[in-house]
Image (cartoon, rainbow, N blue to C red):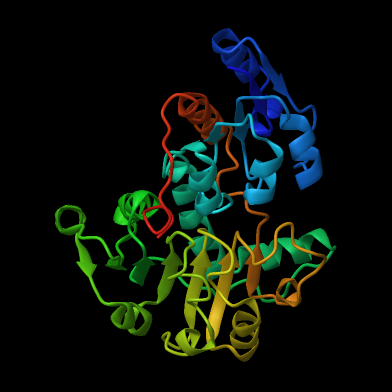
Amino acid sequence: MRVAVTSPFFHLLPYLQEELVSKYPDSKFKDTFDPLNKADFIEFCKGYDAALIGLDRIDDEVLTALPELKIIALCSAGADHLDPVALKKRGVRMGWVAGINKDAVAEMTISTMINILRNFHNLSERLHKGEWPKRRGGGSLLKGKIVGLHGCGNVGKEVVKRLQPFEVDIIAHDREDYSDFYSEFNVKAVSAEELWKESDIISIHVSRNSSTIGLYDEVVLDRLKHGVYLVNTSRGRIVDEKALYDRLKSGAISAAHMDVFEVEPVPGVLELFKLPNFMGTPHTGAGAKEAWEIMARSGINNLVDNWIPEPGVYPYD
């Protein structure tokens, strides 16, 4: 099998290239960290049987230009950058494993909850600018809060486990039945409405699909408890950024952290970034060496373990 590798993990961790080449000698790797645009991706993958990718977008135009390409192996936790209709139409197989970066994202989620509760990010930025803020307190403890998880799948479960020592009350809303897990870790299953009404902190852990895109719009944000803290380490386009800005500005939402955005890379400085009660990070929830290794090796395995996805069926539901 001839494998074209565009995932940046193999550039960042060269020894992973050796692992892949030992299995697939006829492999080539892009030599930069930066993602390829569509034209460059097509040119790079011409004549290859498989592509081992990161967040490259695969649609019908790409597959039409690459008739030899029969397998796309993903190193990512999400699969929404592939068009399942185009894959099925062309008979192209997809290899993907959900939740492979769950530990890294769960750790980030806990850390950013504490960060925005205590306003550490803003205090740090001011210190770096040469200021010594007169008011250095006024934050709030995680202990004693009602933490609501919207989504309790792979990442959500790891967040629940890590919350256990903090003496919080945990509620969760998910379309799946996780009653055994909830019982083991003292999680209360609630409706979406209850989650929005009761949570002191809401952490979003849902996939991006037709039911979640734009879910946290101005209507839903207005249903949240006044003064709530909001964390989104899942996917962009789930939270309406303009509506979030307005509610952070007014104080209806006390503070928020977003690791994901409607457009990535973010085009310049968003108005959100100017708010002292907003913390943004550049889609780096999986940004740990251990997570990169797991994701890259998952991609290698996905060259063998793959299938033709069905539109309307998980993860494309």
Q: How many marks?
A: 0
Q: Quadrant of residue 35?
A: top right
Tell me what residue is drawn at x 74 percent, y 57 percent.
Answer: 265
At x 58% / y 38%, what residue is drawn?
288
Depth check: give the residue in front, 205 or 248. 205
Residue sitting nearer the eye, 48 or 258: 48
Can residue 33 be seen here? The reply is no
In the picture shown, does residue 77 fall above or below 15?
below
How far from the left and from the top, in percent, is residue 85?
A: 51, 53
Image quadrant occupied by the N terminus:
top right
Please identify the residue farthest to the right as the structure is shown: 130
Residue at 44 percent of width and 50 percent of height:
106
The one nearer the camera, 151 or 250, is: 151
Q: Position of 212 compared to 288: left or right?
A: left
Quadrant of the frame with the C terminus: bottom left
- Is 140 placed above or below 18 here? below
Q: Position of residue 124 (x, y in %)?
A: 71, 61
Q: Is residue 261 left or right of residue 80?
A: right
Determine whether 49 is above or below 7 in the image: above
Determine whether 247 is above or below 26 in the image: below
Look at 46% across and 56% down and name the residue there. 110
Q: Is residue 170 left or right of residue 32?
A: left
- Asked where in the image residue 245 lies, by quadrant, the reply is bottom right
The percent position of residue 222, horizontal first and vertical second, equals 48, 90
> Taking the image as drawn, is residue 221 in sight?
yes
Find residue 220 and report its horizontal and vertical position in percent. 45, 85
Q: Is residue 47 rendered to the left or right of residue 90?
A: right
